[in-house]
Amino acid sequence: MKVLLPLLLLFFHFNSFAQNNQKNYQISGKIIATSTQEPILGVNIRPENTSKGDVTDFDGKFSFSLPEGNYKLEISCLGFETKYLDINLNQSINLNIELKENTQELGEIVITQDVRQSKLEQAQMSVNSLQAKDLESIPVVLGEKDFLKSLILLPGVSNTGEGAGGFNVRGGAADQNLVLLDGATLYNDSHLFGFFSVLQPDAIQSLTLYKGGIPSKFGNRVSSILNIEQKEGNFKTLQTEGSLGLVSSKILINGPIKKDKTSFLIGGRSSYAHLFLKLADNPNSAYFYDINAQLTHIFNTRHQLSISSYFGRDVFNINNSFKNIFGNSVISLNLLSTWSDAFKGNLRTYFSDYVYDLNLDVIGFNYKNGITEFGLGYDLTHRLNENISLEYGLQSNYYRFNPGFLEASRPDAGFNTTDLVNKYAWQNAIYLSSKQKIGKKLTLEYGARLNTFHRLGQDQVALYANSNPLLFNEDFGIYEEAPIEAYQKQKRNEIVKSFFHLEPRFSANYRLSESESIKASYQRINQHLHLISNNDAPTPLDIWAPSGRYLKPQKSDQWAVGYVKLWDNYSLETELFYKQVKNRVDYIDGANLIINDQIERVILPGEARSYGWELLFKKTKGKWQGWVAYTLSKSEQRTPGRTPTETGVNNGKWYNTGWDKTHDLSLVANYNHNERWKFNASFVYQTGRPTTYPTGKYEYLGLLVPNYDTRNANRLPDFHHLDFSATLTPKKNRDRAFKSSWVFSIYNIYGRKNAANISFRENEDSGRNEAVQLSIFGIVPAIAYQFKF
């Protein structure tokens, strides 16, 4: 209560302050495109002869207040016809506005001046926001548009290489990113081990990545929040769009069930390269499929219900002796309510399930693991006046962890069924955040989040002497698993361990001039879920584990400062950041993570830190557009011993994380030659990924045993590639409802053999040691046919 009391006093102070300003009336609403009925981002709403107004967000919504009187509103956005509305403001009003496309400007993909201006005005920093059209022409592997892969072209974001799932933000691990789809958690973001992301771009309305200065409404991951929103269906007309490619195809259908009242959206995507193998009598297959769906119903001007879902699976089958199926299932419900012009709420509930199923007939076993999450929350937005608005709410999550189930698939398998004990947890949070303008130059965003995490009872818990599951052998200088003394059974609804955390958040923006501003932020976030993996990139086989008696929550503190500068056709954003993480899980040498029911016997708590400089320079207008993104950073980890005699990991010294990239450079160029041809190119350069090479070998009992260098002291060769694409739009598109285009792309145009891994072996002929490089891609051409009607 000592923590909540100041926040409640702050709320009532602001509320009483608002009640003294009753002469202003609220102007709010939503702006959509006439042809697509989709929300428009970056529409400028300005009353003539005033300095007031607003810019629409990703949902096409705006809100501001004015004194009573008569006004003429100018509604403008590049690519659309400007519209004017005369209003007599004697009460708060809500407007639904449609803008017609300006066909002479549709050829350009731009970030408008109004959107750029919001960077100068908002306290929020370290954020990248995208819509489907913003990066739709960036060349990617196999010609497939990909939201998550496009993030790699932004500063502060990288991954561990080609064919790797997940992404890394500001030197953090991939499991430190929370991916939300319409408010529900996605636990796996990749198809085919990283070749594709799980999201169909045509079904996505917007994507926002928070790298720092994360608002109080978000938590549970210490590196970033990736918030993704699916499109609503068209409320007026039926629309169909899709594409046919060499490797995969997709289709998306949306339209009204009841005009202006109820709409639907359903989309499907699948790869089919395995079908060509079957034609050649090859029994092997590797493919994926996914389905996006959404149903939206407008009850009235105050209430709207959206139900969205996602289902995706990857399937691998090799000679019918190896079969692997894994993927996500998600369904979420959002009830949006406008209680008044200044008071809005969103009731959200969701179900998320990730499963991994492996059948290895050669050995004779079936293996399964997964995680299931149920979520419930209520978020409120309260605009007190023109200068102060509040966001507050509560959230609750229930988790069930299945760490693994192993059973024999045939009588001669030679091992017994192993069912690892399911684990359970319950998490709750309340938050309060305020956005406040102080004068014309200073904008603040500040608040706090109070987290509670409860580890619940399970059927079987191992007990150790002195509650120490990991012993250190001083004679040999190695860690050893402690013997289990007994097992304890706990009640399912029993709280066996609890954690309480207060997370302050603060961001500030100071406007230096009409075209430049400086920013600063601080955030504290706790993460109670841990991905148990000894790989630098996440794999489907990895398992999630909750914090508890032996596994403490990760705690992160991050500071950042930034500078924004705008010109007519260009923009510059640059930031410095420093992040430290406590209780980062590390593994003892030789740790066995597979089918391990007592993971606490092979892990140690460590700490991590990362720091760096980010630069983003954009050209936003004209036939030539694009950006330069550069990151100079360092990411390190250290795991000292628990006592002075213990060695810890790597002798307790700092070592490079597996995703440390000193230099990360991305160049993106778009050229709109004319209405028929558009050309796009991108170049990526990254410092080679850290790895550990053997420095020698010795013979023990007739076996050659490699002797390795200190952890991650070496690096793979530098990573780089150049990609190109061209889009041809036929002239006949202009006068017909059916529109189509051809996309020709080449990934890695100069055939760079980037190293995914380097292994060492003894040459059978010469007997000498040799290094063998594994590369995934060479030159990859692709062609796709896109259509819409």
Image: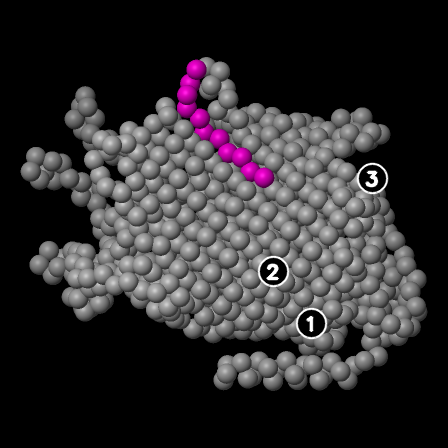
Residue holding disc 2 = 348
Q: Residue flagged by tag 3: what amino acid is it?
A: Thr
Q: Is residue 460 visible?
A: yes
Q: Is residue 282 magenta?
A: yes
Q: Position of residue 407 (x, y in %)?
A: 30, 40
> Secondary structure beneath disc 3?
loop
Q: Quadrant of the image for the C terminus?
A: top right
**Residue at the disc numbered 3:** 103
- Which x, y percent locates residue 83? 88, 53
Location of residue 258 with respect to 411 vertically, above or below: below
Name the residue type under label 2: Arg
- Which residue is more in the foreground, 134 or 353? 353
Tag in front: 2 or 3: 2
Residue drawn 58% across the image and 73% down it: 432
* Span colored in magenta: 281-291
Please, what secondary structure does the residue beneath circle 1 have?
strand
Q: Disc 1 versus disc 2: distance between alpha carbons?
A: 17 Å
Which circle's residue, 2 or 3, is located before the other in the chain? 3
